[in-house]
Amino acid sequence: MNSAWWNALAGGGLIGLAVSLMLLWNGRVTGISGIFYGLFTRNPRERDWRLSFILGLIFGGIALRLFAPQSFGPAGLAPDGLVFAAGLLVGFGTVLGSGCTSGHGICGISRLSPRSLVATGAFMGAGILTVALLRSLGAIP
Amino acid sequence: MKNNVGAFIVGLLFALGLGISGMTDPQKVLGFLDLFGAWDPSLAFVMLGAVGLHLISYRLIRRRQTPLFSAQWEVPPNSPLTPSLIAGAVIFGVGWGLAGYCPGPGITALASFELRPFVFVAGMILGMLVFKWVNLRFKFRR
């Protein structure tokens, strides 16, 4: 195994620890799209823990920026219009599909939820086909 | 209060895990999805690490009567499969494959102060608001 694999395994373990603590402490699933969408829909009493979680993500991001700035990859490879369109699809799709990589891909599969297994297969398949299409159009060098 | 501190710590650990694993680098994510090209399989180990641990911890934690800082469990029930679930997941997957960001890494990458994650998160917020508006009319059975 090379170092990228070890890093991925270790980072994945840390994510597994994080979602376990969310369950143990707050009794909740760490579904990031759902937590974020709740900021625009739920009553104010439901808002504080969601905002705290999002702030935690951003503070974690600041720590990465300080100690491992290469984590964010090379800047600005995709055109802004494409990135915005990607955001639109991700925002709409994750709410319609009740979850994203964290809620379905990690928490749902760990519960062996049939819905999450199907959703994860669907978004992985669609992502793979999208990249293959971009490649066939010559958009990927 | 404990709920909020807990959620903050979870967010912090989650972001560090994303960064260490390589999920916050969109080029790396696109390499993982590039199964028919220059495939980089390393990110499969993120899921292996996270699910491997949580498969066990989920069962141990659910033996408790209640969570530590809350009166009851808020885990989603096993609802039936719906067309919305599959359509939504496919739409999300297309967006993921276009830019290499899913929601967690997109939000975490705001801390890089580069333009790209801001453009992505702005699009994501608009996409969610569009859903909210469309759902008022169509009432999707999710």
Image (tube, coloured by chain):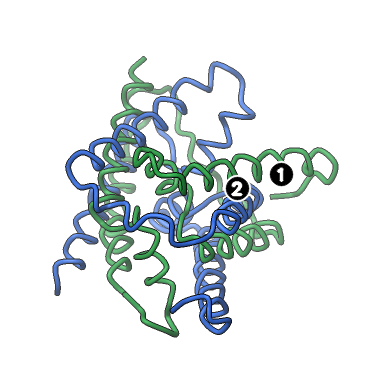
Chain colours: A blue, B green
From the viewer's perspective, tell me whether residue A40 is left or right of residue A36: right
Badge 2 amino acid: Gly
Q: CA distance from mark 1 to mark 2?
A: 8 Å
- Residue located at (47% from left, 28% from top): A50
Which residue is located at x 35 percent, y 22 percent? B69
Label ID, residue B131: 1
Q: Residue at x 34, y 65 (%)?
A: B28
Q: Is residue B72 left or right of residue B62?
A: right
- Image quadrant assignment for residue B8: top left
The residue lying toward the viewer, choosing from B48 and B125, is B125
Q: Residues within 10 Å of mark 1 (few under 14, many from 20)?
A: many
Q: Position of residue A124 (x, y in %)?
A: 49, 68
Q: Is residue A4 left or right of residue A53?
A: left
**Quadrant holding the N terminus of chain B:** top left
| Label 2: chain letter | A
Q: Is residue A17 above or below residue B90?
A: above
Kindly indicate the quadrant of the structure image that contains residue B88: bottom right
Residue B66: x %, y % from top left? 38, 29
Q: Looking at the image, which is closer to me, B128 or B123? A: B123
Rendered view: B26 above or below A87: below
- Name the foreground residue: B106 vs B60: B106
Q: Residues within 10 Å of mark 2 (few under 14, many from 20)?
A: many
Which residue was labeled with disc 2?
Answer: A91
Where is B132 relative to B54, above or below? Answer: above
Tell me if label 1 and label 2 are in contact, CB under 8 Å. yes
Q: Are marks 1 and 2 on the same chain?
A: no
Q: Chain of mark 1?
A: B
Disc 2, SS: helix
